[in-house]
Image: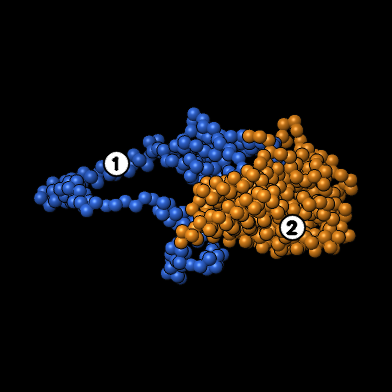
Chain colours: A blue, B orange
Amino acid sequence: MKDTWDEALLDYLEGDMSPAQRADFVAALNEEQLAELTALSRSTEQLATMPDIVVPHTFAAQILSRIAPCRPGLRRRLVMWLENHPLLGWQAGAFSLVALLVVVMVGSNPLTAPSTIDYSATPFAGVQTVGLQQAGRAHFSLYAPQAATVSLIGDFNGWGSVQEIPLRRQVDGNWVTDLPLPTGRYQYAFLIDDQTIVTDPRAEQHVSDDFGRRNAVVSVL
Amino acid sequence: MKRLWISGWALWLWAVAGALGAQEMPTQLAEQIARFGNAVESKPAEQARLVQITTAALRAGADAQQLEALLDLALARRYTADATGHFIEKTSMLLVADIPEGLVRGKILEGMAKRVPADVILAVADTWTQALRVQAAELANLQQSGLTVANANERETLINLGTVLARRYAMGNPLAGLAQHMPHPFVADSGAQLILAAQLLETLLLNGASQEQALALVETSLAQGLSVAQMQQLQFQVADQLRQGFSIPDILSAQQKLLASPMPATEAVPGTLRDRMPELLPGGRGLPTAPGSGLPGGPGIGVPGGMSMPGGSMPGGSMPGGLPGGGLGDLPLNNLSGPDLPAL
């Protein structure tokens, strides 16, 4: 089954299917397969636009000339040292064991162990939003300190085709906007740097977007 | 080969000129297509076909600004003229069949914005198209059996709601299923009642209620013959309680108890249901009251069939017609489309 799926996927991506076969193939996919197909299609598309690079015939020689002479790794050197000094090796082993125990005991002490993990260093990992609640208005915010631009796309602006809705950057790395919206229910996502689409993980609800991902849903009373 | 290329371009220019000459295509849209032809690598014959399809879509009643928006996005995401033509064709086919196309157009725009392959977008559009056709036929049957649909907006809202319920929640014939619980013969505003019932059902399902639970409440409300205002208030109550974090089972059981108790025969008085909620919620909990407000009897303004956007009407929300609490609100039922989206 796996082979069949991989082969069919390959045929699709390489354009070896007729339009009718492509349509049948896509129609038979489940959500997970659709997501995989979409991601692979995007990658294939991007690869196709990359320039062809002509590799000079001296390429291998250039690379090899820059590689430093091979030196044994730390582990290998330690083993070699222990082989040469067996008695010292036992003493070093015992010392390492005691040191490890101390580290474990100190680390597990709630007074000294770190209580929180700082996710802010990871790009977009700390995406946070607060979806709207005020009558007739929706407040959207996204924590994305590394982003150069963030905009809101959703069915209220034709997914960005009708009107651009940029978010304003705050000093704390949050991007915010207030949007007047008529009463209703809307699906939306954030577009970061005109490239990456981020689903709001803290939205009131989520629904399948039919393309293998999920859309955030906001209700305006 | 070169001759073929030239003849293709000539055909395309002829088609643009023909469309313009016949005053079928606004100049701005024609320019947009010309830009499309220059920017996207497509065969001239495909571009000529795009012109023909766009012209046909306009003839079928498509909005020129919406077509421009679609072409804009197709340009930005580098879809071929062939794929873009198919996208436009999907929506115009529905227009020709007098079926609301907002849902399908929205799906196409969304797929393009997300750089989804054209084949996948078209497959998804086909699925929604099929569901829309089924729901349109189902609504026509209901109208034949007496359901009153006041205007085109109500019709569009009902078809969209039925489609969303059928597609997202695997409900067979949602509109007919709900309508059979309404008192017969249908009353004058039965279409509006059905809209509110379907919206309430969608709200409950979206918030995690099982089909059985959600249908039990909605069917009871319909069977009791609640007026539009009462249905609207029920919808608003549920949305408010969800917003406050009450669990679905608690909300459903409280609302069922309210419905089981005698209801005033006239229009619901704002706040009536809310005032009685504390005693009915499990554990005697009361609903915290918003400072100084209470809840008005549903200030909602409809966006059921589509809301107007600067630059063209957009599909009616992600789940068209799915209004959380407002529903048809204070607007007269013959004016269901929402106000223009304020300028951003």
Res. B213 in view: no
Spatial CA span between label 2 and label 1: 77 Å
Location of mark 2 (residue): B98
x then y, percent, for residue A125:
46, 42
Q: Tell me what residue is drawn at x 52 percent, y 68 percent.
A: A21
Q: Secondary structure at mark 1?
A: helix
Q: Quadrant of residue A203 in the image?
A: top right
Q: At which x and y percent is residue B122?
A: 58, 59
Identity, as a three-letter code, of the amino acid under mark 1: Val
Q: Is B32 or B234 nearer to us in this picture?
A: B32
**Residue linked to disc 1:** A102
Give the residue displayed 53% in from the left and 58% down from the top: B7
Q: Residues within 10 Å of mark 1 (few under 14, many from 20)?
A: few
- Residue positioned most to the left: A84
Chain containing mark 1? A
Query: Image check: A211 left or right of A70?
Result: right
